[in-house]
Amino acid sequence: MNFFRDNSDLQFHFREGTAWDRFVPLWEEGFRFADGPRTLAEARELYEACLHEVGEYAAKEIAPRAREIDEQGVSFEGGEVVHPPGLLRNIEGLRKLGAMAVSLPRELGGLNFPVTVGATLLEILSRACTNTLLLHVFYQATAVMVLRFGTKDQVERWVRPLAEGALSGSVAMTEPDAGSDVGNLSMTATPEGDRWRLTGRKQFITNGCGDVCVVLARSEPGSKGLDGLSLFVAPRRENGRDNFRVARPERKFVIRGSATCELAFDGSCAEILGPRGAGFAEILTFMNEARIAVAIQGLGLSQAALVAARDYAEKRVQMGRPIARHEMVADMLFDMEAEVAALRALILRCAAMQDRILGLERQAQASAGELATLKRALRERTPLVKWFGAERTLWITRTAVQIHGGYGVVQEYDVERHYRNALILPIYEGTSQIQALMSLKDQLKWAFEGPWRLAGGPVRVEAPPDTLGDALREMAGEYNRGFRAVLTESVGFSGMLRGLMNRTSEPDRERLGYALLHAERLAAMLAYTRAAEALVAHGAASKTHRALAERFVHRSLPLVHLHAEIVRSGDRSTLERLRG
Ligand SMILES: Cc1cc2nc3c(=O)[nH]c(=O)nc-3n(C[C@H](O)[C@H](O)[C@H](O)COP(=O)(O)OP(=O)(O)OC[C@H]3O[C@@H](n4cnc5c(N)ncnc54)[C@H](O)[C@@H]3O)c2cc1C
């Protein structure tokens, strides 16, 4: 009954798989704080104690309430959003454990725990009840935005209450006509004295009924696209009255315990966060962290589905043996296990990169070269981990339903809920297609910045000198060949040459039709490659790790080949249809 202790792969990552010494001393600034740990060992003891407590609370209290929270859903009474009572009890329990905003600084009510510890905590919560995770993350996520861009006074007023769980928050970008297309945002912000007035509507805002909302709005009249946007912080109530209106929450079949709100701002009061016009750059920091958080949400759901499927398959007997002993079911279970391990390895690799970056940034003399390399590696992986976490969680949870047969679609079994909830993952925080576009755009930019990258292939992998390493190199090679193929098909060989000579000029959108057509296939190829790379890095740890890495790589390589074949096929039928 402990979601930290009962997970052998999480235990492995915590005990052996994480290079804590690479970032904990940076986070603790050489262990110089009187109220912090004095050594690396002490820091790890603190992390373990917290994860142990949360793991136990999640298994014993949160998980048993998850079905009821889903069944009750969010309601709307007397013009107010009402959360399921069990959800509020879960949040109250986590608040009492002091686990609301573990990565915030201690002096602001956090614990100064690295992102890696936070990621493990979120995985545990999502496994227990993904609705609870979703409300929980917006306490820290909202606070981080104020901490990062707010004035000292704003930090004093908002960050500590959010970190302590006294106030809850939300982050609002999406509008009715600006979903994937953030540049189409139309909410206006008008200065008035030292404050601002916001006018417009926000759509689909998670916990938009919370006490404080970080809002992206257009502050520069006449601006277009991603320019002229600024970030604001708006209290839900001002002088005891509603500052903006919260409409009825959406009625959904996914994450039913999470309030998804439409917000109407009509000259609502707000304060600007950070410099005028820097809104898009600021919100990007949130989006990048939120994308990894969605992958973690997926990991928790995947782990829950894996455990449920394994347990069920051991007990359910058909044709004289447990279904887990039938070849096809055993095959599904092995794939599920390998995929979960690969997703966890990729997420924790990204978290460790984030930790090293944040740690180095705290140091005045951090090496600019190392920071740039790490930031580029993390930036490359961010859309991939979101894509992989979302898409593979859908497959894993669906397979858990399949293994349960008819009982899989019955509400008394949790797997139908996991599958339904997984359906939101490829949609919010940028759809899977948008992640694919981000990945393609970055690869194009880097390729055209340095001719050698295009010639040699933009992607390299860390691979051991053995057969697993050979398969990994083959996956990366397939991506590189696929990437070159879409470029040649899009802009032709002469276009590539022009791009190479004129380093910064990316080809324009109209000419990139073939690359855009295959963006998601390319993203899938690279996501499998990076997940495999992260898993293979632990392949030498034990026989189990080696077996999981082999399984994942041997199942992923043919998929990468399949995508590559389609990408290189030159089939333009969709583009021809588009031209009509
Ligand atoms: C439950 C829930 C919670 C949410 N929480 C928040 C929140 O807290 N804060 C917030 O700001 N937003 C939130 N959102 C909004 C969410 O981020 C958007 O729904 C999402 O970005 C997609 O936007 P859209 O719904 O307008 O779809 P659209 O952008 O209209 O996309 C529709 C389809 O077209 C595809 N598409 C669009 N453009 C392209 C393109 N250029 N190339 C290829 N395909 C394309 C998409 O992939 C998708 O399949 C939430 C949404 C939901 C459902």
Image: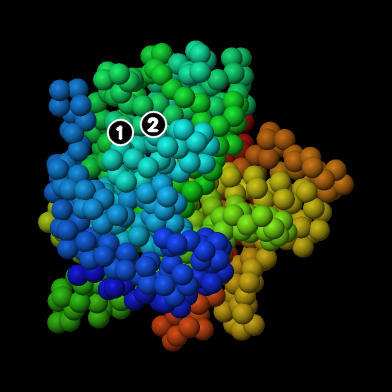
Query: Residue 411: x and y, percent?
Result: 14, 53
Secondary structure beneath dot 2 equals strand
| In the image: residue 68, left or right of residue 562 | left
Query: Neighbour class for label 1 at 10 Å: few (<14), some, many (≥20)?
Result: many
Q: In the displayed orientation, state which residue is furthest to the front.
A: 34
Decide: is 328 above or below 152.
below
Query: Residue 75: x and y, percent?
Result: 17, 33
Indicate which disc residue 210 carries.
Answer: 1
Residue 23 visible in the picture: no
- Residue lying at 24% horizontally and 33% vertically, measured from the top left: 251
- Residue lying at 23% horizontally and 42% vertically, measured from the top left: 257
Decide: is 269 above or below 503.
above
Residue 209 visible in the picture: yes
User: As shown in the figure, which amino acid type bears the numbered disc 2?
Assistant: Cys
Q: Is mark 1 within 8 Å of ligand 1?
A: no
Indicate which disc residue 213 carries.
Answer: 2
Residue 441 or 166: which is nearer the viewer? 166
Query: Residue 419: x and y, percent?
Result: 28, 53
Query: Residue 406: x and y, percent?
Result: 16, 60
- Residue lying at 27% horizontally and 73% vertically, measured from the top left: 6
Are the residues at dot 2 and dot 1 in contact (C-beta closer than 8 Å)? yes
User: As shown in the figure, which amino acid type bears the numbered disc 1?
Assistant: Gly
| In the image: residue 343, left or right of residue 379 | left
Residue 527 or 30: which is nearer the viewer? 30
Secondary structure beneath dot 1 equals loop
| Position of the C terminus by quadrant | top right
Residue 547 occupies quadrant = bottom left
Query: Neighbour class for label 2 at 10 Å: few (<14), some, many (≥20)?
Result: many
Q: Quadrant of ligand 1?
A: top left
| Position of the N terminus by quadrant | bottom left
| In the image: residue 390, left or right of residue 422 | right
